[in-house]
Amino acid sequence: MKRSPAFVTAFFFLACAAFGQQAAPSLSNFLSSGPAPQPAAHPLMAGAYGPEPLAADQRPNEPYPAKIYLAPWSRVSVGGDISPLGIGIKCTIDINTFMDARADFNVFRLNPGHFEVEGFNTYPHLQFTSLAAMYDVYPWNSVWRLSAGLMLFNNNQISGAVDIAPGTQFTLDGQTFYSANPGIAPGTTPLTGGGVLGFHRNNPALILTGGFGKFIPRGYRHWSFPTEFGVIFTGGPTIDVNKSGWVCTNKAETQCANLSDPSSPVTIQFNNALNDSLSKWRRTLNDIPVYPVFAYSVVYSFNIR
């Protein structure tokens, strides 16, 4: 049945009046009694927002929250990393809230095999072994770290043996030489040699590093992933060589000598050229007095008391 506008309007006002009669007592009580009491908090929400903050004169005089305090010698960590020093194992113990003591052991060995380049047969060998003691300081108990220590043992070096094929031409200090063929004289052998590039001139050596992340977290976490960047003051790398066999100064191999004969003019010429070349290489290496350190570690911490 179609309703007229007048009927709809009248019905709307009657409904509003009925609602007003029901709501009036409650509104009157609200206005006369002040603010309505708050409903009780759900049991699961109790303490969700914590206690009221203390007044300024009631707060303990602590520079940092108590939850980050770590008792001395109470927590250790063990971890590992990969760096230019090789594969590392790290053991750390806390000294106080702001400092740790750490021992780093690194080792790496590699024999990549045989390389042949223009008559030079090379057999390289990498041998890295080192042990360091470090102190880690976290200024203002931040995640940033400053570290200092000593590399107490360092046997990091690259060595190699070289066989030079008979008749191979090579240059030393601008002079041309040839590895002798076995048939030019009784007992003739081609030129062979070896060398060692060492990274341990200063032993022990000072270490200075910095980084991000703690080797022992000041909290309840067990795992951490600290980074480290710095240098070791190893001094310039050292280089030493040894040689044996026969060498010639002309391709026809009419002027040859055994390098074990120090009085031969050919031996003297070769040794002078080799020593001059070594002097140049050593001066260049002396311009690199530090060894780089950069590592990303994975460390697990646990309490010991």
Image (spheres, rainbow, N blue to C red):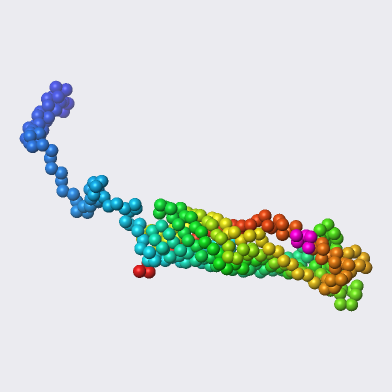
Q: Is residue 8 above or below residue 205?
A: above
Query: Percent x, y for residue 172?
Result: 81, 60
Q: Is residue 56 above or below residue 124?
A: above
Q: Main secondary structure of the magenta part?
A: helix
Give left or right: position of 90 versus 41: right
Q: Quadrant of residue 92?
A: bottom left
Q: Magenta stretch containing residue 276, yes or no? A: yes
Query: Which residue occupies 41% across, 63% down?
Result: 94
Q: Would residue 168 be visible to someone looking at this image?
A: no
Query: Percent x, y for residue 133?
Result: 51, 65
Query: Which residue occupies 67% across, 55% down?
Result: 287
Q: Nearer the viewer, residue 100 or 90?
A: 100
Q: Nearer the viewer, residue 204 or 188?
A: 204
Query: Percent x, y for residue 150?
Result: 54, 63
> In which quadrant of the rendered image does the N terminus lie?
top left
Q: Nearer the viewer, residue 125 or 153?
A: 153
Query: What span is in magenta?
Result: 275-279
Q: Magenta stretch containing residue 273, yes or no? A: no
Q: Is residue 61 above or below residue 168?
A: above
Query: Which residue occupies 65% across, 56% down?
Result: 288
Q: Total of numbered circles in the picture?
A: 0
Q: Residue furthest bottom?
A: 186
Q: Quadrant of residue 98?
A: bottom left
Query: Which residue occupies 75% across, 60% down?
Result: 279
Q: Nearer the viewer, residue 21 or 64?
A: 64
Q: Is residue 204 above or below residue 33?
A: below
Give left or right: position of 32 versus 48: left
Query: Percent x, y for residue 271?
Result: 82, 65
Q: Would residue 25 be visible to someone looking at this image?
A: yes
Q: Residue furthest top?
A: 6
> In which quadrant of the rendered image does the C terminus lie?
bottom left
